[in-house]
Image (spheres, helix red, strand yellow):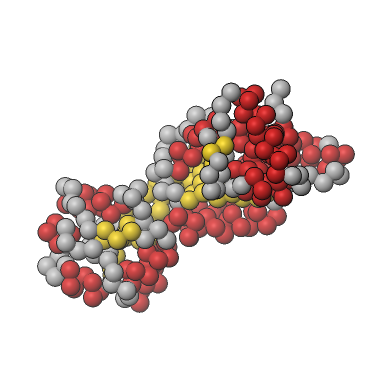
Amino acid sequence: MLDYASLSALAAVIREGSFERAASALHVTPSAVSQRIRSLEERMGCALVVRDQPCRATQTGHQLCQHVDRVRLLELELQGMLPTLANSGQARVSLPIAVNADSLATWFAPAMAAFAAQAPVLVQLAVDDQDHTSQWLRSGAVMAAVTGTARPAAGCNILPLGAMRYVAAASAAFIARHFPSGVTVHDLARAPSLIFNAKDELQSRWVRRLHGQEVELPRHTLPSSQAFVTAAVAGMGWGLQPLALIEQHLRDGSLVELVPDTALDVPLYWQHARVASSLLEGFGRAVLTAARQALQPL
């Protein structure tokens, strides 16, 4: 049998980022946390924590942390059925979730906040590109994710959410300066574009669909959905913007579509671990309701 005191220590170290903060959260000494982790690593025969700043889980460590999260969810279910356990004061359970930044900046945050305000959870949010959030599920780092991947990860269920609509936009002055004769391949290769990070392929995908070929785009990197909009309005570059974030800018003319009627719809899905938990299912229902109100039908 696994030692759940040691597993709780492992989860606390990964969640808090250090042995000292984990000890404070668990109301024990740092040496006690270190001893529990060391004992668990000896039992598993491998390292579970990368002792860095902050501490990170190894692959096996991630799997054990996911196991702890599932056990806590199941304990919460049991608490609801057994009043004597409910009276013991069950702590909030950690709910690790991965989501793409544009969903977080638009429809996801209100749904998450409303659910967490009334449920006994502590949401641990990871932000990544929608084409990469499923990797967090496969590694065991999260229990659910908003992802652009239609194929479910092993041990997960999947629900279609809808499509996030993106439009290629820039300021009118930027378009007049960099695309005087239309959005040509030649001008795209010279005009600065905006990308969220190195994983962001939306701009390249839009160009391929528009011109049927690859174009090497000059890039500014801005890992913030709000900064992305601000930079475009200021004339820093062009980029694929979530329509929900820039509708007002399109109406008042501070942003203009590069090519009208060339919106790019990105399908999104909700993947979650197959664990019998009404809490996780309730979170999924809140996500699904918000997504279907905000996103385009698939």
Is residue 292 depicted above or below 77 in this figure? below
**Residue 185 picture quarter:** bottom left
Q: Is residue 291 left or right of residue 234?
A: right
Which x, y percent locates residue 262? Answer: 26, 57
Q: How many marks?
A: 0
Between 165 and 73, the residue placed more toward the observer is 73
Q: Residue at x 17, y 68 (%)?
A: 178
Kindly identify the residue that appears in the image at 26 percent across and 58 percent down: 219
> Residue 68 appears in which quarter of the rendering?
top right
**Where's the N terminus, which quadrant?**
top right
Asked whether, in this view, residue 29 is left or right of residue 206, the answer is: right
Expressed as whole percent of the image width and height from the top left, the position of residue 60 reads 55, 30
Relative horizontal placement of residue 110, taking residue 9 as reference (left or right)? left
**Is the residue 7 above or below the residue 238 in the image?**
above
Tell me where residue 41 sits by quadrant.
top right
Residue shown at 53%/44% (left/top)? 52
Residue at (27% x, 66% y) in the render: 237
Q: Is residue 68 visible?
A: no
Q: Position of residue 154 (x, y in %)?
A: 50, 29
Is residue 132 visible in the rendered structure shown here? yes
The percent position of residue 105, horizontal first and vertical second, equals 48, 60
